[in-house]
Amino acid sequence: MLGINLIVLSALLLTPASVQSASAGCDAKLAAAGLCGSNTGSEIIIDDTHTGPSNPGTSPIGDWDPGTDADWTPPSDWTPPPEFNFQQCLDSWDSYIHCFRESEEADEEAPADEAATPEIPAITISDIARFAPAGSTIAGEPDNVGVVGLPTNFVATASVHTVNDSLFGFPVAVRFTPAGYDFRFGDGTTATTTSGGRSWADLGQAQFTPTPTSHTYAERGTYSAQVDVRYTAEVDFGVGWFPISGEVTSSGAPQEIRIFEAHTALVAHTCQQAPDSPGC
């Protein structure tokens, strides 16, 4: 058994006056507690006793055998550290390459689902020109026939056109919107409009009256008229529509327009009534 008795006396518990008084007339109890003496109250006295046998324990130094590396068996999941090439570190010191363990400098391979998404190259109007709609066929009123000196009304039909296909290996939607119409009337004159024109009936106008897309021929003959439609374009790779700079042009097929001269004559009967009348 180990027994320790501690008696702590501080200046907070005993004043110098009480210690001096105990020293002057010290009885047996104070003497047993060690309070008789010249302590002025500024000291701490610690007294201890030890009874029973002691057991210092054993020391491993005398008969301890540390063994050798050959005696050590690594755990089943142990992986030896990578070899550190110090000379390579010195050779590459300026760029701070290979100065760390391989396990610390090597980047882990990104999981397949976190692999970098391939970038879509910059798209130009030439890249999507092959998706453009076919050209519009022009129509002249009335019935692709006109009269010298009177307006012939032309109408070209074009609308928004969307194509779903692939571009650079990615699924894409391409949308074309008519932006301009370039008319060529076959007599050397042209006109550019933002509309393909409307019929006289849709406009509520009489035949042979001028419209924004009409043309008046000065001489009789047969003319080849046509219209080219210019489109703006947008693409969507599944994340929204993005405009493409520039325009793509779709050329329309030629349309034959016949222009006649008109002569007037004052007659008493219609051609049905008098087939031999002037102008019949």
Image: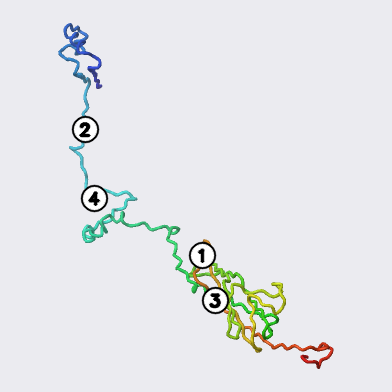
The label nearer to you, 3 versus 4, is: 3
Please report whichever mark, 4 or 2, sits nearer to the chain's N-terminal start.
Answer: 2
Question: Tag 3: residue type?
Answer: Thr
Give the CA separation, mark 3 to mark 4: 83 Å
Residue 230 locus on image (x, y percent): 56, 74
Instruction: Identify the residue position indicated by label 1 in the image.
Output: 242
Residue under circle 3? 249
In the visual, does 103 lie left or right of 154?
left
Q: CA distance from mark 1 to mark 4?
A: 69 Å
Q: Earlier in the sequence, mark 3 or mark 2?
A: 2
Residue at position x 56%, y 77% from top? 250
Q: Quadrant of the N terminus?
A: top left
Which amino acid is tagged 2?
Thr
Q: Percent position (x, y) of residue 70?
A: 23, 50
Residue sitting farthest toward the bottom: 276
For the residue labelled by badge 4, is the local secondary structure a helix, a strand or a loop? helix
Q: Within 10 Å of the Cα at label 2, are there few (<14), some (14-19), or many (20+) other Cα atoms?
A: few
Q: Amino acid at mark 4?
A: Ala
Reply above or below: 65 against 272. Answer: above
Q: Which residue is mark 4?
A: 70
Secondary element at image label 3 = strand
The x and y percentages for residue 103 are: 31, 55
- Left/right placement of residue 135 relative to residue 35 reads right
Residue reaching furthest to the front: 266
Residue drawn at (53%, 64%) of the image? 241
